[in-house]
Image (cartoon, grey):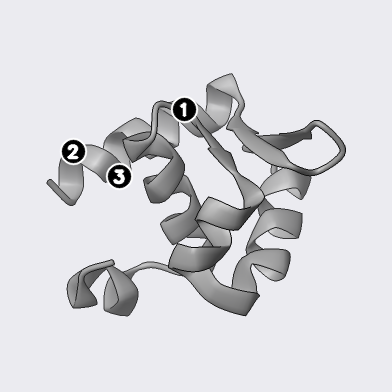
Amino acid sequence: MPELEKELLTTTGRLLLFLGRNKGLATFTEVRKVIGSQIYYALKQAITLGLVVEEGEGKKIRLTEKGSMIAECLVKCFQ
C-alpha cells in the first residue's frame, strides 16, 4: 500500500479501499497481508458500521451496498 494511503486513511479506510480495488470481495488472509494485525480492529469497526460482512465463517470479507459506495469514492481518490 502506498505511503500516502497509509498516512491519510485509518485502518478501516484502508480496508474499504482494498476491498474496493478487489471488486468488493477478498479473503481474510489477503486483507491481513495489506493491513497487518490491525485488521481485527478495522474489521470489527466496519462490521459495526454496516460496511462489510464476513462470509464462510470469517474466511471472506465482502462489502455491503453502503460499503461499496464509500469504497468507490476512495478508489477514485487514490487512483
Tell me, yes or no, whether the two marked residues, 3 and 2, touch with CB atoms within 8 Å. yes
For label 1, the SS is helix
Q: Residue at x 68, y 37 (%)?
A: 60
Q: Is residue 78 left or right of residue 22?
A: left
Relative to 27, residue 67 above or below: above
The residue type indicated by label 1 comes to Ser
Circles 1, 2 touching at the beta carbon (< 8 Å): no
Q: CA distance from mark 3 to mark 2?
A: 5 Å
Q: x%, y% of residue 74?
A: 30, 45
10 Å crowding of disc 3: few (<14), some (14-19), many (20+): many
- In this view, the residue in front, 29 or 36, is 29
Mark 1 burial class by Cα count in 10 Å: few <14, some 14-19, many 20+: many
Q: Earlier in the sequence, mark 3 or mark 1?
A: 1
The amino acid beneath tag 2 is Lys
Residue 54: give x, y in percent of width and height.
76, 37
State the residue position of label 3.
74
Is 4 situated above or below 68? below
Query: In terms of sequence position, does the residue under pointer 1 or pointer 2 come before the other?
Result: 1
In the picture, the disc for residue 76 is 2
Residue sticking out furthest to the left: 79
Q: Secondary structure at mark 2?
A: helix
Q: CA distance from mark 3 to mark 1?
A: 10 Å
- 19 vs 68, nearest the viewer: 19
Circle 1 is placed at which residue position? 68
Q: Which mark is residue 32?
A: none
Q: For the point 21% across and 77% down, which residue is it?
A: 3
Return the residue found at the far top: 65
**Please, which residue is most extreme toward the right here?**
57
Residue at 61 percent of width and 31 percent of height: 62
Between the residue at mark 1 and the residue at mark 2, the CA separation in whole angstroms equals 12 Å
**Which of the 4 image quarters holds residue 61?**
top right
Amino acid type assigned to the residue bearing label 3 in the image: Leu
